Image: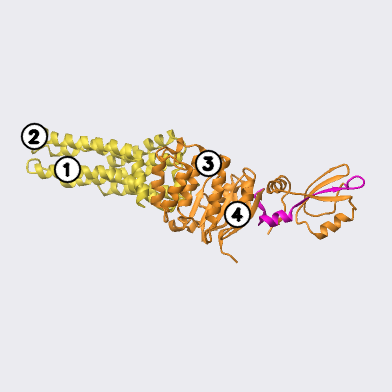
Chain colours: A yellow, B orange
């Protein structure tokens, strides 16, 4: 299984590098921005810190959808599954390795951000009051919307046409953002996003298991 | 009776409403080199793809090494080597990276043997697959498939694009493999001289059916081409069954007949031909006869 996971990560090195640069840049900016902007305005400006994450959280579902679509279009165009499935493995394993690499790509971003937040909160909590529960809800929503975006990306990517997946992804991502916009950060949006994510992943898994390679 | 390395029962496959395989039954015993022949588009590659689970059958049952295709585990697949027509390797990978991936997934990996093959074929490990010639890709594909020490080797037109020397090396390797205990090869090829050289059993696929399935020697014995010279004009029709082809020109008649036997000889003798001589047939001749005309019933 490990060679498959490794292969999937290697195949994603360009988008992973890109998102690592964006995330790294954002975290570095946070570390400079918080003391110079927020601390002098404390205690009333705790929320801007949380909202500043929104920029990254908006990018993340688009990134995860792009990763999913890229994984599938590359597979389709290079016949990767056709080759792999004749080796000592199975379609389920190939698909599982793909999911692990794909999901890990945006979980890494969230994890890096969570660690940065933990460090910042620990350092400045006494100065800037934070709504920790709200922050956690934001992370949960970001994860679920990215997961749903990833599922949509996988589903849209499994076709020979390279333009169509982009259009499908763009069209289907808009409702995801609208769900969060209208239902807010809570169980209602979690359930809706989780349902969309699971539906997308199960659908693409079924399709992948049965498709001619 | 030997256990079967490959077993196909009543395999039917439709493509967009067109019947490509129409109830194919095939059995490759363990330790056998089976040559599957047929014209382009007759369904040889489809059979192999269904056997490997790359696509589904419309109907029927297939199994490899005693395990149904749908139930093949990673371990079972690890005992099967596959060399595909066109060599579907990951084109943008370097050879070394592909080897690493293949080795990482393999259950058995004979590093020494693989190194020998790489050296013999002079394969550059640092070059991208897409930069290799078709022949080199075939050699790499075969080297990878052989390095896992497969119980069953499935070769789909593997020598396509290879020069004579590489083809010979390829066939020697196949023979080398089969000499190991209980190994089997299912071999599709358009180069019939290759099949004739190594196969001990052949199947001929025509019009979606396996019209021939028997030992190579048996096939050669069963199908006869005769040149018959009559005193007067050759008869327009002969009351013989299983005539594959018949060409008459003046007093001469050239007929190809399946399942030639004493009864058919006696029937021919009633026409009191001046002479009757056998024209030797290669596998290629038999193949052409079987696939150009109506299906021959020599399956057995």
Q: How much space separates mark 2 and mark 4, taking CA atoms?
A: 82 Å
Residue count near mark 3 (Cα–Cα under 10 Å), binned few <14, some 14–19, many ≥20: some
Q: How much space separates mark 1 and mark 2, taking CA atoms?
A: 19 Å
Report whether mark 3 lies on the same chain as mark 2. Answer: no
Compared to B182, does B290 lie above or below? above
Instruction: Report if residue B226 lies within the magenta region.
Output: yes
Q: From which residue to which does the magenta span run?
A: B207-235
User: To which chain does the residue with label 1 belong?
Assistant: A
Q: How much space separates mark 1 and mark 3, taking CA atoms?
A: 53 Å
Q: Secondary structure at mark 1?
A: helix
Q: How much space separates mark 3 and mark 2, taking CA atoms?
A: 67 Å
User: To which chain does the residue with label 3 belong?
Assistant: B
Report whether mark 2 lies on the same chain as mark 4. Answer: no
Report whether mark 1 lies on the same chain as mark 3. Answer: no
Nearer to us: label 3 or label 4: 4
Residue count near mark 2 (Cα–Cα under 10 Å), binned few <14, some 14–19, many ≥20: few
What residue is disc 3 on? B86
Q: Secondary structure at mark 4?
A: strand
Q: Secondary structure at mark 2?
A: helix
What residue is disc 1 on? A117
The answer to whether the residues at label 1 and label 2 have Cβ atoms under 8 Å apart is: no
**Residue drawn 26% across the image and 43% down it:** A142
- A201 or B110, which is in the foreground? B110
What residue is disc 4 on? B34
Lateral position of residue B117 relative to residue B37, left or right: left
What residue is disc 2 on? A41
Point out residue B219 in the picture as x, y percentages from the top left corner: 70, 55
User: To which chain does the residue with label 2 belong?
Assistant: A
Residue count near mark 1 (Cα–Cα under 10 Å), binned few <14, some 14–19, many ≥20: many
Point out residue A187 in the picture as x, y percentages from the top left corner: 26, 49
């Amino acid at each position: 299984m490990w060679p498959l996971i490794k292969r999937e990560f290697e195949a994603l090195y360009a988008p992973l590098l890109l998102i690592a640069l964006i995330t790294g840049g954002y975290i570095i900016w946070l570390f400079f921005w918080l003391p110079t902007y927020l601390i002098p305005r404390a205690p009333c400006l705790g929320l801007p810190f949380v909202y500043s994450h929104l920029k990254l959280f908006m990018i993340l579902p688009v990134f995860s959808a792009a990763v999913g679509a890229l994984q599938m279009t590359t597979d389709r165009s290079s016949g990767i599954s056709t080759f792999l499935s004749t080796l000592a493995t199975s379609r389920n394993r190939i698909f599982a390795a793909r999911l692990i690499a794909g999901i890990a790509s945006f979980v890494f971003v969230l994890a890096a951000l969570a660690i940065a937040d933990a460090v910042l909160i620990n350092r400045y909590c006494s100065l800037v009051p934070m709504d920790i529960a709200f922050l956690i809800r934001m992370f949960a929503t970001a994860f679920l919307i990215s997961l749903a975006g990833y599922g949509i990306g996988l589903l849209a990517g499994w076709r020979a046409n390279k333009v169509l997946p982009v259009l499908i992804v763009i069209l289907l991502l808009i409702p995801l953002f609208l769900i969060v916009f209208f239902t807010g950060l809570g169980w209602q949006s979690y359930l809706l996003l989780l349902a969309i994510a699971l539906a997308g992943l199960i659908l693409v898994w079924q399709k992948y298991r049965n498709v001619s390679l | 009776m030997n256990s079967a390395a490959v077993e196909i029962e009543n395999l039917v496959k439709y493509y967009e409403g067109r019947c490509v395989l129409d109830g194919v039954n095939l059995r490759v015993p363990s330790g056998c080199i089976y040559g599957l022949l047929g014209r382009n588009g007759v369904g040889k590659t489809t059979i192999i793809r269904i056997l490997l689970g790359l696509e589904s059958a419309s109907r029927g049952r297939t199994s490899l090494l005693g395990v149904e295709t749908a139930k093949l585990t990673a371990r079972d697949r690890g005992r099967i080597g596959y060399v595909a027509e066109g060599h579907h390797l990951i084109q943008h990978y370097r050879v070394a990276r592909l080897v690493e991936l293949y080795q990482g997934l393999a259950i058995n990996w004979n590093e020494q043997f693989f190194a020998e093959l790489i050296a013999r074929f002079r394969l550059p490990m640092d070059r991208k697959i897409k930069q290799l010639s078709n022949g080199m890709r075939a050699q790499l594909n075969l080297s990878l498939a052989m390095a896992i020490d497969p119980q069953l080797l499935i070769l789909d037109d593997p020598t396509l694009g290879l020069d004579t020397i590489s083809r010979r090396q390829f066939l020697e390797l196949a023979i080398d493999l089969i000499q190991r205990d209980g190994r089997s090869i299912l071999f599709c090829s358009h180069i019939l001289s290759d099949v004739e050289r190594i196969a001990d059993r052949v199947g001929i696929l025509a019009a979606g059916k396996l019209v021939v399935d028997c030992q190579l020697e048996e096939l050669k014995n069963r199908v006869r081409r005769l040149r018959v010279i009559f005193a007067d004009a050759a008869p327009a029709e002969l009351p013989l069954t299983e005539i594959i082809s018949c060409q008459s020109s003046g007093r001469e008649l050239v007929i190809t007949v399946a399942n030639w036997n004493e009864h058919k000889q006696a029937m021919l003798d009633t026409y009191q031909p001046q002479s009757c001589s056998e024209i030797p047939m290669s596998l290629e001749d038999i193949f052409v006869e079987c696939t150009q005309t109506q299906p021959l019933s020599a399956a057995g």
